[in-house]
Image (tube, rainbow, N blue to C red):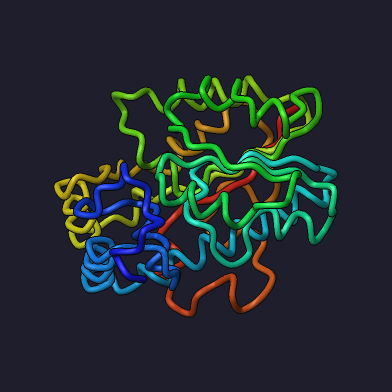
Amino acid sequence: MSDGQNWIPQSVDVSVPSVARVYDYLLGGAHNFAVDRLMGDKAEEMMPNSRSAARLNRAFLRRAVRFMTDQGVRQFLDIGSGIPTVANVHEVAQDEAPECRVLYVDRDPVAVAHGELIVAGNDKVGVLQADMRDPESILTSPEANRLLDFDQPIGLLMLFMIHWVPEDADPQGLMKRYREALPSGSFLAISHMAGDHVNDEARSVTDRLAKSGGDAVTYRDRSEIEGFFGDFDLVEPGLVKFAEWRPGGPGDISDDPAVNNVAFAAVGRKP
């Protein structure tokens, strides 16, 4: 993609890397700038499993959405949705049940701009620019009121998101607010970088992203991540490494154990 295209929102600083755009680059997308590609290349150089980890996280998303749809969920809230790429939530869900409604949320204006282009003409899908750390701006937004019925089960997706929230921002309290907003029978899917897998190379990459103006990653252990589900009932197999959550084929798991161990993932159901 050319960095000089005139569709780029004026508010975007193309000299600062974006988590959403680096992730897009690692997935093989085209909606990223030179600074994002540079950061992605550095991540791949220091952590050769970066691209594979991004793909496995995307594969977990597909499995989680299909599972929720099979359980009767017909509306989804994808917070930190990123830049649209192959197999978006609405594509997976509506392939199973065409009546499914989806609200995508991201704070990155490029992600939002492209999301709006992707879903144009689909009145069952919306895109909202907001920060996950401000739940009221999401839960009370006009788009949420239009697309989500908070009296019916909702599938909330927070994939590779909560590890961007530092402890001083009270991530447990933040997640409690989201859980409380969901009605009984709703599901919550989380994937989160695994603290027991972090090494000096991984810390170097994420520290470099933070020093370049991006967010810092907070690595957490299994018990801390499980706490984000509160009193939700974890569906089988519980909180496991993300490639181990109900893999259905070769694309869901890697031959490299190091890749499979990058992150924890689970799906919980609200009683």
Q: Residue sitting at 69 percent across and 70 percent down? A: 248
Counting from the top left corner in percent of width and height, residue 147 is at 72, 34
Position of 107 compared to 247: left or right?
left
Quadrant in the picture for residue 5? bottom left
Who's the residue at 50% across and 31% down the image? 227
User: Is 226 placed above or below 112 here?
Assistant: above
Using the image, determine if residue 164 lies above or below residue 135: below
Of residues 41 and 114, which is closer to you in this image? 114
In the picture, residue 73 is in which quadrant?
top right
- Residue occupying the point 67% across, 59% down: 63
Question: Where 221 sits versus 199, above or below?
Answer: above
- Provide residue 142's location: percent of width, then percent of height: 63, 25
Rendering quarter of residue 22:
bottom left
Taking the image as shown, residue 126 lies to the left or right of residue 99, namely left
Number of callouts: 0
**Image location of residue 189, percent across then percent down:** 60, 44
What's the residue at 25%, 59% (across, down)?
202
Rendering coords of residue 257 (x, y %):
43, 72
